[in-house]
Image (cartoon, grey):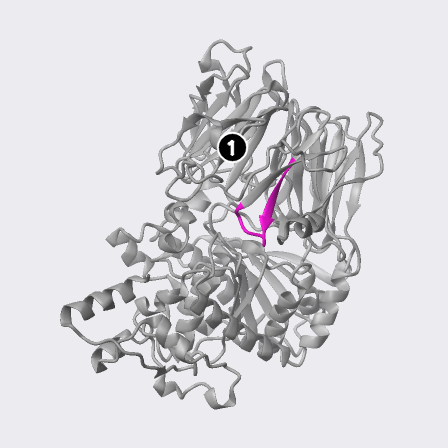
Amino acid sequence: MQLTTLATILSLAAFGAAQFTSVLPCTNGKAFSLRKGLLYALATGCIASARELYSQRAVRRDDPDQRLAPLAARAIKPDVEYEWLEPPQDPDALAWSQNETEWTISQLDALPHTSEILDKIRSLADGGPRLPAYSIAGDKIFRVRITDENPKGFLEVTQKHEDGSLDDWKLVLDMDAIGRAEGKSFEFQGGGTALHNGAALGKDASRYIIGLSEGGGDVIQLREIDVATGQVVSDGFNTGPGRIFFAWLDINHLLISHTATPDSPQTVAGYPAAWQIWERGTPLSEAEEILRVADTSLVAYSFSLGESGRGLLMEFTSSFGMKFHVLSPDGTVKEVTGLPERLVMRFEVEATARHLLVVTGEQATVAGRTVPEGSLLAYDFSSCVRNDDERLSVVWAPGPGEFTPYIALKGLAASRSRVQMTMTSQGVERRLTIEYRNKAWEIIDEVETVAGGMVQIASGDKFSNDIIIIDAGLTHPSVASLVRANGTRTILFEEKEFLKSDDFVVVPLTAESRDGTIIDYVLVSPKSFEQHNSTAGRRPVLMHGYGGFGTSLDMVYLDIHLVPWLEAGGSIVYAFIRGGGEHGTSWQEAAAGPVRRQNSWDDFIAVAEKLIDDGFTSPENLGAYGHSHGGLLVGVMGTQRPDLFGALVSDAPVMDILRFVQMSAAGVAWIPEYGDPANAEDAAAIRTWSPFHLVRDGVDYPPFLITVANTDDNVGTGHSRKMIAKLQDAGAEEAYLYVVAEGGHNHINSYSNPVLMGHRTSFFVHHLMD
């Protein structure tokens, strides 16, 4: 029950008022619930439950008799009266969002370019194979391949040989078939965009554990697969749904942290709070607990340390706080000591056969050497070292102007005795190969990345020094390659070119933010942009940004949904604003917390103003889009500076920053990023930029489209619903909600949701080009 409804009932009991039902006119023609009309109802004595009121009348937006009321009749209601839209599976909220979605689709379908754009995106999606996800494990390489016929994907395997040759790919698992057999809409964990490097058992990779995600959500189920037969192992490590992290110890034992049983310990963020050793043939509920974290920690992760048979227990205590324990084959657990207090958060642990890799988030002294933040360190967990003070060493330290923007995600991987990493110096990216030799780390190879591109290190092998890399660029198709220890390369996949790269330019530029900080951004534009012709000053431009959680924007091949935009003469801008990871920890922290967060918004605004002041575009032709935290960024732009933009698209956003903790169990983990709404000072600062709280009556808002999936169990659907409802009440005539059934938090996929992506592009073309 919502707090507002409970408070109303308690008030009624106190005053002895009678309860009856009533329906009030809603400003957009739909039934007006008590939650939304509480003040009015109390004033007139019309007291009723929200569900009773809403169920009286379900009005469709496309009903000609129920059009939007005059602006004068519309007004924003108290914030609590939007809370009924928060519960993800509330029947009334689902009905409301379905009604809004149907209206949105009808409006987007009617736009003049929609049909043409949808046909283009479908043809591109059908035009060739998609880049698979790869993982290397001993003698084998695994991949997830998605096709039009099998949209959930295949898990396939090939054998790699010493001479560099590969066998033909062999089917291991058909995800669509598993879903049909179990009556579920299963997807590979993460949508098949990445594979867990610890999922295969041993050098021969005879067993493989997959994570099944229903509808693309974060909650998964485990299935152990016999790689030779492709069958689910009957007495295997198979689980029900939960948030699960695991690592093989040997064929009969799994290190696991999970929330998949009713009594499994959880943190306040809803993630696992304990590690267990699970023995084959026994129920998960009887797994032996070996260590537990405080429930105030964020999460307990489980990883494998390769052929040593050791497991690694990693605890996130805060955004920069991590603790590690090593589980030895004899069952003893030893804490890793001597690490710097502040470490850069990484979601995949990387380790060679004897070294755990960490990135320092502060200046540190290691073996008598002072190194800056962003330095890569190695902790020797082998028995060769007797003195714990000698276990920590420096792998690489950045010099002036050197950064590791992708170190947290795709810019670091370890193989048996080597470290692969990417770094940028003066805007040029390089891939470094570093090896441990004679008790010291040595750079043995350095490869420069193609201009305007990046290298993703997809996988490292714990049993050899082979790696898989993906070369990519904004206008250059991705190429996946197996790189052997001797440097020879075997191409695994080449993405089909769907943009003529010679027709476009990628230009690095800068803008000055409000406090004088220089902000880098990249412009992708038709080559004709340099010619000041009749369109100068009003070129259609889409801005994209993120600026949160130390995450950097990927400079990979442009998504197919952007092709119609570019071919129609549009440009795209990538803004590297503070809060991201482009320039190290200090860059991230410059926008962390409720007060400094405004720096990130100011950076994006500065880039927008620069584009306009330079005469490249105008507010009427400037749009912005972003996902998740980037969706929040777009929401702030639309409410702080609605005058700067002609159209906005926000995907799976966080919008109510005073209630993000209540609206998502994982929200507790975001407090270091946004602040604590329960703290009065933090809440006051949050109110100055929280999009939901900046919506005002009478403001001329640009056309606003918010998209989300019903299966999003990360941020959830409530933020999107509430934001659109409040914008509509404020008089925004073009505030659209678009909800898809599946896709989880990563629903914006041109292959699995081509209609949605086509509608997004048509929305921009109509408002910024026509």
Q: Is residue 206 above or below residue 559?
A: above
Q: Residue furthest left?
A: 15
**Viewer-proximal residue, 450 or 83?**
83
Asked if residue 513 can be seen in this view, the reply is: no
Residue pushed farthest bottom?
Answer: 65
Residue 655 in sight from this viewpoint:
yes
Q: Position of residue 331 (x, y in %)?
A: 50, 17
User: Vertically, is 225 above or below 722?
Assistant: above
- Residue that appears at 37% across and 66% down: 84
Locate the C terminus by quadrant: bottom right
- Percent position of residue 646, x then y: 52, 74
* Magenta region: 209-219
Q: Secondary structure at mark 1?
A: helix
Q: Residue 156 location in percent, x, y?
A: 75, 41
Callout count = 1
State which quarter of the image contains the N terminus.
bottom left
Residue at the image point whose x is 59% and y is 26% from the top: 280
Q: Nearer the viewer, residue 458 or 61?
A: 61
Q: Position of residue 114 (x, y in %)?
A: 67, 76
Does residue 236 sit above or below 380 in this rendering? Answer: below
Kindly identify which residue carries mark 1: 284
* Residue that appears at 62% across and 52% down: 184
Left or right, 574 with reference to 695: right
Q: As drawn, is 189 to the left or to the right of 272?
A: right
Q: Residues within 10 Å of mark 1 (few under 14, many from 20)?
A: many
Report the amino acid beneath label 1: Leu
**Quarter holding residue 559:** bottom right
Identify whether 327 is placed above or below 577.
above
Determine if the magenta segment contains residue 122: no
